[in-house]
Image: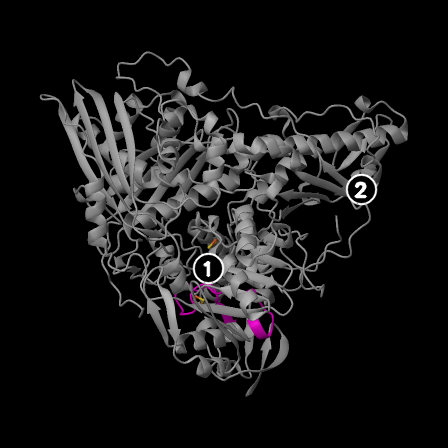
Amino acid sequence: MMPAHGPDQGSSTPTGDRDRTDGAAGERGPARRSFLTALIAAPTLALATRIGADALAPQPAHAVVPSLPAPADLVDLGDLFIVAGAPTAHLLVLRVETDGIIHFRLPRTEVGQGLTTAVAMLVAEELDAPLDDVRIALEDARPELLFNQLTGSSNSIRSLYGPVRQTAATARARLVAAAARSWDLPARTLTTRDGAVHAPDGRSAPYGSLAEAAADPGLPVLPAAPKPADRHTLVGRPQNRIDARAMVTGRQQYTLDLDVPGAKPCVLRRPPTLGGTVRSVANLAAVRAMPGVLHVVTVRTGVAVVAETFGQALDARAALDVGWGPGPADALSDADIRSRLRAAAPPPLLPPLLTGHVDAEFDFAFVSHAPLETNCAVADVRSDRAEIWSGLKSPIVAKQTIAAELGLPADKVTVHVVQAGGSFGRRLFFDAALEAALVSKACGRPVRLMWTRIDDTRHGRMRPASHHHVRATYALGQVLSFQHRVASAETDFRHGLGEMLTATAASLPAGLGNATFAQTLFLTTVKSPYHFGLTTQSLTEVPTGIPTGSWRSVYSANTRGAEEIVVDELAARLGKDPVAFRREFLKNNAQRAVLDKVAAEGEWGRALPEGCAQGVGFHEEYESRTACLVEIDTRDPEHVRVTKAVIAADVGRPVNPRGLEAQLLGGLTDAISTTLRAGLHIDKGLPLEGSYSQFHYARQRDTPTDVRIFVMPASGEPGGAGELGVPAAVGAIANAYARATGTKPRSFPLDFDVDFTPYPR
Amino acid sequence: MPSHTFTVNGRSVTVDAPDDLPLLWVLRDLLGVRGPKYGCGVDVCKACTSHLDGADIRPCVVPVREAAGREVTTIEGLADGDTLHPVQEAWLEQDVAQCGFCQPGQIMAAVALLKRTSEPTDADLDAIANICRCGTYFRIREAIRSAAAKMR
Ligand code: FES
Ligand code: FES
């Protein structure tokens, strides 16, 4: 591996071999000599054992009408990621340097979810090394990793838990073997702790001193297996983020903080409607002559200005007089979208006479991902090669596409993955990286390209708007059927997921029939946790021409959120308390445990003033389950506030409970925002909202002053956690609102007035 | 091009820039001080929050001419060498940051608040309008309370 240079050390092109997690450039000196570079064969993952285990396990006898397992009970999308990643799991790269520092190159990205910390914990655990000795770098795009470099579907820990531990355990075995050979002692008599190998006679050798010897391919090494979980001393205990200090001191580097030599600020002027095209620029010469302006070039998505500072680029952008061509959705506004979605959802079957039924229709607006770091990238394109830096969750597809667009062979395009300021699904797409590459090529210089906030809100991707029709029938205290028809604006999954699903098609459970790609995703992510008799959930997609993308929890936030509202309404019809009703119809005790936890800790049923109420929601996905109890205060209709939240989660095996709590807190805030006030109005082909003053993502004043989060004890393998928190909280908040106001929440966000003057187009 | 002299994190600097160039871009693009983040450019998200003579400002809407002769402090200038400010310590203790992008601004806003009052009320905390898109608000609350208690 080549020596590392921090981006501010004056190397001509920063290499990708930087450690992002300490965030600060230039801290690492010249590369230390020699290390163990281990390309370690991890065994094929044991996967089959878990598929369907909970669905097929005998259930205690119930009076309820049982539901058959749904496809997502048998194989969920995350399982498919694991299957797809397994053949390349052995390509993980870990190395130990002579200074004892352990470097691991993570083929995923860090966007705030705490993954680098969790992975560092796994590595330190298996190597018996101090956590401080582990550095995690984000891996450049490596096409040979195939499907094993996509960050999404709450899958990183699920898919990496086995392979990372196996890789580190094998590295440990090599270090032990090296010490055994130098001391002429049997390897099995040696132990490891605190980053060193120890002999029974008291001798010890720090890992750094063994790094060279351990790299010897001729070394006899005992087979290695990861520790059993009951010997974990680090994994499973709350741990603070390894990058926290860099973040609180401002040293954490994001894409536009990198110092790529010669790279100049760049912004685009974008069309007045989504997907519009550039026809002409009337005042090109005048804008080129503005102070600080270096280049003005037209690319497919707009007119790019490159200048000495972003301030000057923004001024020039504003001065541009551009003639625009139409986009694919120019005529489209919210009302049309809503009626198209309503028309697309096939009506549920009529209930038989004499059974009671609950019938409810829901609408959810488009929602911006709105990560605080806007879409951005740095690109340095030369005639024979290119180098790109960006926060990318799908870097392999990015690399292949950018290479094709530039007309370069893929191996001449280096794509560095940079830690990002949030994603929520947005960074599955690499539009900023592609734009930066095209601009850099057009003006022949490196550029730092940034989307403005208004563009990020208006021209970014959105969670698709959806319409839901739920019909449940009941008789004699039992729920007999539960039908949920979803119609959603089409979700764009063209970021490598399609290839992955095709490659894993053989693992899909029977019964998916001719499901489309999106339906397959829907059916492998959405399931009902309740025994509600005959249960069907279906998706119809409606193409709209509006750019969309998965948003934290993909279909679940709306679909399961709506269902949790219906669950409360069913309980009321049957004269039951919402918690007692859920307890009765949930499928197993692990589910009931999280519900019981929030009911007890949140004092379910406690008296609250008029206009205030509690609400509860439950959700299960990706082998994890959670319940959420909130209290809401609606006494000021202008400022409805969730005042308290109690959350319990069982994720099978939490690697870092403190990080998990952070994810659940984030999911709660997402649910507060999208349920109460945050959405996008589409008006003649463009969102009206342009910034956080208009897209009302929650602020401090909108969030609870009392939050309690409980992580249930470990019980199995890690489940998914990144998206888990949203759907249960959506249900809890809507249910609390319903009880506090005596209304039936049906359209989200609940408070969706246009209370602002839109920015000009 | 006019030239402007002021102090950034204790260091005197002189830059040539148009009078109305926002301080944020002077810091980030001309001086390489990249702790203050762009999140909106219009004093809405508060991600760029820094201090001018000790009071919080949003440099995305402060023209560089207003900084002349004054003292600018960004997140990079808050710690005293390796010794963190108590608010930064509290941020570590509460493990506040997720993506971290808003946190320089959040911390600078909290420091400014604690200068104004040593016992912030719930209303004071609610008045911090900085967006955290990762939704870390509750930990921010806890961190400010903890820092306030330690600083008293
Ligand atoms: S960038 Fe200054 S307030 Fe948003
Ligand atoms: S930590 Fe990501 S925006 Fe606040």
Task: Report the chain holding disc 1.
Answer: A
Q: Residue furthest front?
A: A407
* Mark 1 / mark 2, whichever is N-terminal: 2
Q: Residue at x 89, y 31 (%)?
A: A182
Above/below status of A683 relative to A216: below
Q: Horizontal placement of A452 versus A559: left or right?
A: right
- Left or right: where A319 falls relative to A503: left
Q: Which mark is residue A374?
A: 1
Q: Which mark is residue B85?
A: none
What secondary structure is the stretch in magenta mostly built from?
A: loop
Residue A200, percent from left and from top: 84, 25
Q: Is residue A84 toward the left or the right of residue A133 in the image?
A: left
From the top left corner, tell me how far across and down residue A441 is, in percent: 56, 65
- Residue A558 to residue A371: above or below: above
**Front of the two marks 1 and 2:** 1
Vertical comparison of A160 with B144: above or below: above
Local SS, label 1: loop
Classify mark 1 as within 8 Å of ligand 1 or not, answering yes or no: no
**What distance separates the C-alpha of mark 1 from that of mark 2?**
41 Å
Instruction: Say what secondary structure mark 2 lies in.
Output: helix
Is A691 rendered above or below residue A78?
below
Quadrant in which the N terminus of chain B appears = bottom right
Q: Residue at point 37% right, 50% down?
A: A548
Badge number at residue A208: 2
Magenta stretch: give its range: B29-57
The amino acid at mark 1 is Thr
